[in-house]
Image (cartoon, coloured by chain):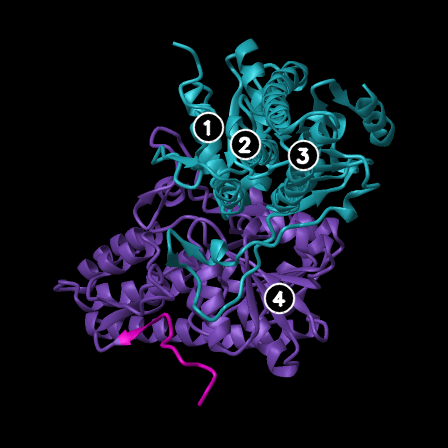
Chain colours: A cyan, B purple
Amino acid sequence: MSEQRWLPPIYWDGDAVAIVDQRVLPHKEKTLRCTSPRQVVTAIKNMAIRGAPAVGIAGAMALSLGASSMKAADTQTFKRKFVRLCRQVRTARPTGNNLGWAVEKVYSVVVENPGADVPELIELIRRRVDEILAEDVAANVAIGNHGKEVIPCGARVLTYCNAGALATGDYGTAVGVIRAAFAADPSVQVYACETRPFLQGARLTAYELAQAGIPVTVITDNSVGSLMKQGAIDVVVVGADRIAANGDTANKIGTYTVAVLARTHDIPFYVAAPRSTIDPTLPDGDGIPIEQRDPKEVTHFHGRPVTPADVPALNPAFDVTPHRYITGIITEVGILKKPFGKAVRKAMEL
Amino acid sequence: MSEQRWLPPIYWDGDAVAIVDQRVLPHKEKTLRCTSPRQVVTAIKNMAIRGAPAVGIAGAMALSLGASSMKAADTQTFKRKFVRLCRQVRTARPTGNNLGWAVEKVYSVVVENPGADVPELIELIRRRVDEILAEDVAANVAIGNHGKEVIPCGARVLTYCNAGALATGDYGTAVGVIRAAFAADPSVQVYACETRPFLQGARLTAYELAQAGIPVTVITDNSVGSLMKQGAIDVVVVGADRIAANGDTANKIGTYTVAVLARTHDIPFYVAAPRSTIDPTLPDGDGIPIEQRDPKEVTHFHGRPVTPADVPALNPAFDVTPHRYITGIITEVGILKKPFGKAVRKAMEL
């Protein structure tokens, strides 16, 4: 029996897009069958699917779904409608880079094939989307292979949120590094931060690692400092939602806190992400848009209120870790090191 | 109508000890009526009452309750049984200093009154317990008065866990400082960290501050770093469970992380606590026992599991913040400053 015992987070189910509903994992395995781009966009917005690379793939599949069912008598009409669809899909969530990158990559099919008719465009778009998915999985495996080199023998690895198979096409970025490290050294073990408020660590990372037979212990986000002070963490590996040209990295809210703690305790702090997460148009992290989500995700749990009714809450979904806190950025083309500006430029040219 | 709209967390209800059940606040106001010391000890263990000073008071009241109903024909029997009761009560929770301090203070009644008969001892014990309660409230008001001086005009104050009326006899330590600062300057506002897993911040601090009309916003513990980086926090005030002779401070898990972040962002970090929290017998924080609680408090929410069933979790209830991260310790006799060793010694001699 292979290590992989679950379906990938998103896949074609005939002509529909099947999305594993990550809001109810690990206790329910429910799949959403999306037959319209709007349904996929809703699944992105309400976090049935999340994780920047997975959201990029979902966006791409939404475009293919939309293209196939588009009522267009001629190429001009098709293109006009498709541009509008691209615009709708790319704004589903603002912080992750991969969604805009994937939409751009799918849209370029139309630009690159001026002579194609509508059925040809639909076919070419579908092929491009399948390439994006396959390349993401391949990138994650390559990230794992590069990344395993920075995981010391017997390491106790801290990871944050879920940068696993569920956050990508499959395999995972940070979790991919852990998978590869564990395959080479079964004494590797993991601390997964629960990651409030959506609990991606407690629910999703714990689930994936347990499925893969990798020892994992869940901790509250607020116990990271204490564990590090006790010398219980050897290395940190996290994912990313958007990386600026200078290496500044947006990731799940709380990542910056973990990075500061890692620096204070002299623990290496790695970001693992495919190049589709890198936004070379942004000079630094100040320009990364930070999504503010509904405070109810903080104030309520399974629909039940936690806080007093009249007290407000903040719910920023991401924060930015300045590049100076990052030891290395593990990509599919190798580990980028300081100075990140130069390394990022070089990686994007490959 | 006075600011105080709720009952104190613990009080005499005739011959019983009434404890406001903090596990169900703010949505239910339920009071436990304890008629035996064992019931009080259970309420301490299961966190129906929590907060080091409140736990100390509860322990003291449990002793008075036990003394009153003790079957003892003579003083010798009474003393022997009372020593045993003291031992049971003081081990209810290990980290906070105030419980052991209060038990010691009540027990000393027996030592100081060798000629008293049983009814006299019972009466003297009850009087001592009432003194402990009254002195704690007075200490908190004094802490508020000293502490308000370190809260800048219009400050955005970050506090952690609940160091409020509910954690003490009344008024609160860190929350007492906030109350006093707000009374002097109504432009003061508060960020309350939700404080996983028991959510004392989201449930209790938010409740108390809202009741007092003090603007409060709940944030997840993992968003502290991001808020500080944005310049949104001016000062941190937290409570304490045990303070060693050198100023090292045990407080709710996550306090150390907040202290590291405050240092990184050059934000003053204050601890507010009565002298009953200081343990002059411990040279530093290494000797403070850290309670490990049931992992179910992390893995479950309202009885429903969050994590996969087979994944372990850690649930340390406290961490230790080294004195070098602390700007000052606000006590009822003034604000202790560095070097803390000398300041603590002097404060304990007053």
Of residue B276 and residue A340, the one placed in the foreground of this image is A340
Q: Residue at x 36, y 32 (%)?
A: A29
Residue on which disc 4 sits: B330
Q: Specify whether disc 2 shares its chain with disc 4.
A: no
Q: Residues within 10 Å of mark 3 (few under 14, many from 20)?
A: some
The residue range painted magenta reads: B1-12
**Distance from Cα at disc 4 to Cα at disc 1:** 66 Å
The residue marked by circle 3 belongs to what chain? A
Q: Residues within 10 Å of mark 4 (few under 14, many from 20)?
A: many
Amino acid under label 4? Ile
Which quadrant of the rendered structure holds the C terminus of chain A? Answer: top right
User: Does residue B3 show up magenta in the picture?
Assistant: yes
Amino acid under label 2? Ser
Residue on which disc 3 sits: A75
Comparing marks 1 and 3, which lies closer to the viewer? 3
Q: Are marks 1 and 2 in contact (CB under 8 Å)?
A: yes
**Distance from Cα at disc 3 to Cα at disc 4:** 74 Å
- Rendered image: mark on residue A68: 2
Q: Are marks 2 and 4 in contact (CB under 8 Å)?
A: no
Comparing marks 4 and 1, which lies closer to the viewer? 1
Q: Is residue A232 visible?
A: no
Of residue B227 and residue A251, the one placed in the foreground of this image is A251
Residue extending farthest bottom? B1
Pinpoint residue A91: horizontal percent, then vertical percent.
64, 47
Pinpoint residue A143: horizontal percent, then vertical percent.
65, 19
Q: Which structural element holds mark 3?
A: helix
Q: Which structural element holds mark 2?
A: helix
The residue marked by circle 1 belongs to what chain? A
